[in-house]
Amino acid sequence: MYCPKCGEQNPEGSNFCQKCGASLTAQPAPLPQSSPLPEVERTSGLAIASLVLGILGIFIGPLAILAIIFGAVAIAQTRKDPGLKGKGIALAGLVCGIVGLGLWVVALVWFGLIFLWLFQITSMPTVFS
Ligand SMILES: [Zn+2]
């Protein structure tokens, strides 16, 4: 076995190096621990995207659907990866998306009813002619 300090070959089972006296039983000095990367607060990009789309979705209905999808995916991401922040943001985006979609559906129904009403009015002359 070789001395970890000086490299001298020593008989198997020696406890100390014959040349420099270094302990041979001790584990070689551990490599200097690479300083762990500072725990950067990572925020799920999808969560932010979900919130932005959720707010936009209140005005532009189809974006609300994307907000719901992104929000749900982002929440799943933050559950899987505890270091990933943005669960609250994702939840807000999801809720905004649902509200936006709800408003949009209500608006579509109203537009549909108004359209039907207008259609009936405009088709009346032909009915009564
Ligand atoms: Zn030695």
Image (cartoon, rainbow, N blue to C red):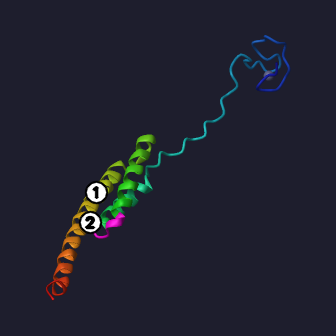
Q: Position of residue 118 (x, y in %)?
A: 19, 80
- Closest to the camera, between mark 2 and mark 1, is 2
Q: Position of residue 110 (x, y in %)?
A: 20, 70
- The first of marks 2 and 1 along the sequence is 1
Residue type at tag 1: Ile
Residue type at tag 2: Trp
Residue that appears at 84% across and 16% down: 10
Q: Using a 10 Å C-alpha cutoff, classify the residue at mark 2 as few (fewer than 14 neighbours), some (14 to 19) or many (20 or more).
A: some
Left-right relation of 57 to 125 = right
Contact between marks 2 and 1 (CB within 8 A): the answer is no
Q: In terms of image quadrants, where is residue 116?
A: bottom left
Quarter of the rendering occupied by the C terminus: bottom left
Q: Which mark is residue 98?
A: 1
Left-right relation of 72 to 105 = right
Q: Secondary structure at mark 2?
A: helix
Residue that appears at 47% across and 45% down: 39
The residue under label 2 is 104
Which residues are the magenta region?
59-63
Left-right relation of 128 to 28 = left
Disc 2 versus disc 1: distance between alpha carbons?
10 Å
Q: Secondary structure at mark 1?
A: helix
Question: Which quadrant contains ligand 1?
Answer: top right
Return the residue found at the far front.
Answer: 129
Is 104 located above or below residue 45 in the figure? below
Q: In terms of image quadrants, where is residue 82?
A: top left
Q: Using a 10 Å C-alpha cutoff, classify the residue at mark 1 as few (fewer than 14 neighbours), some (14 to 19) or many (20 or more).
A: many
Is 103 located above or below residue 22 in the figure? below
Left-right relation of 100 to 8 = left
- Along the line of sight, the residue nearer the viewer: 121 or 61: 121
Say whether residue 12 is magenta.
Answer: no
